[in-house]
Image (cartoon, rainbow, N blue to C red):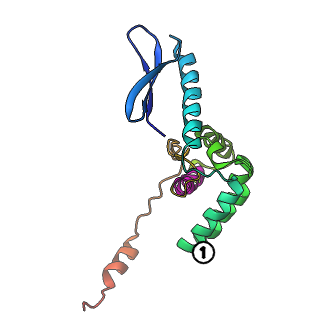
Amino acid sequence: MSPAYLIQEANGRFYAKYQRHGKWTKKSLNTTKRVLAQRRFGAFLKQQEEQELLYSEITPVPLDDFAEEYLRYVKSAKSLAHYQRQRQMWNNLILPFLEKKTLTPQVTSRRIEEFMAQRKESVKAVSVNKELFSIKHAFKKAEEWKYVLTSPARIVKALKSDGQIRVELLTKEQYEHLLDIRLPLA
């Protein structure tokens, strides 16, 4: 999607500044109120994305079809254990929440954040972040495979970690044992 920015000019009015055919232009959002401008800017971005989608090579697919293709890729490119974790995560958590028949371009960053918030109620942030990274990787592939213009997960931030740092110190005996193990130099 072409870059676009929400700007406020000296007269207090808000505008959507965006590129059209390689040149910068702006469109008035007809308001001086920030909240209303943000809402209208969001609608403007959605409209721009839909127009780009019409004239692009993007081929929207249902999320369950995309997940199946993504999992086939993971199976061929990653370890079996990683594939099994990904398959379980997608089939049991991600697809039921995002709804299987949703088209890939209809998945939004807001929906991904809602998924994270729901998961945070039952698991630690570390686990939610692992699920987010899986979604991010999948939608990066969706971008490469021309199922979405830009990944909706790209702007979603990971949660602050609530995991505990494990510090393990060696006992005197363990330390001495490590020093006693000497491998012959080749």
User: Height in image: 117 above or below 101?
Assistant: above
Q: Residue furthest top?
A: 11
Quarter of the view holding residue 83? bottom right
Give amino acid for label 1: Leu
Observer-nearest of 88 and 143: 143
Residue under the point 69% across and 59% down: 65
**Helix, strand or loop under label 1:** helix
Residue under the point 65% across and 58% down: 66
User: Height in image: 33 above or below 2?
Assistant: above
Magenta region, main secondary structure = helix
Q: Say if the magenta span includes residue 116.
A: no
Quarter of the view holding residue 169? bottom left
Residue 14, x across and y down, in percent: 47, 16
Quadrant of the image for the C terminus? bottom left
Residue under the point 31% across and 79% down: 179
Residue 139, x across and y down, in percent: 56, 53
- Residue that label 1 marks: 80
Q: Is residue 78 visible?
A: no
Residue under the point 64% across and 49% down: 104
Q: Which residues are magenta?
A: 128-143
Residue 115, x across and y down, in percent: 66, 44
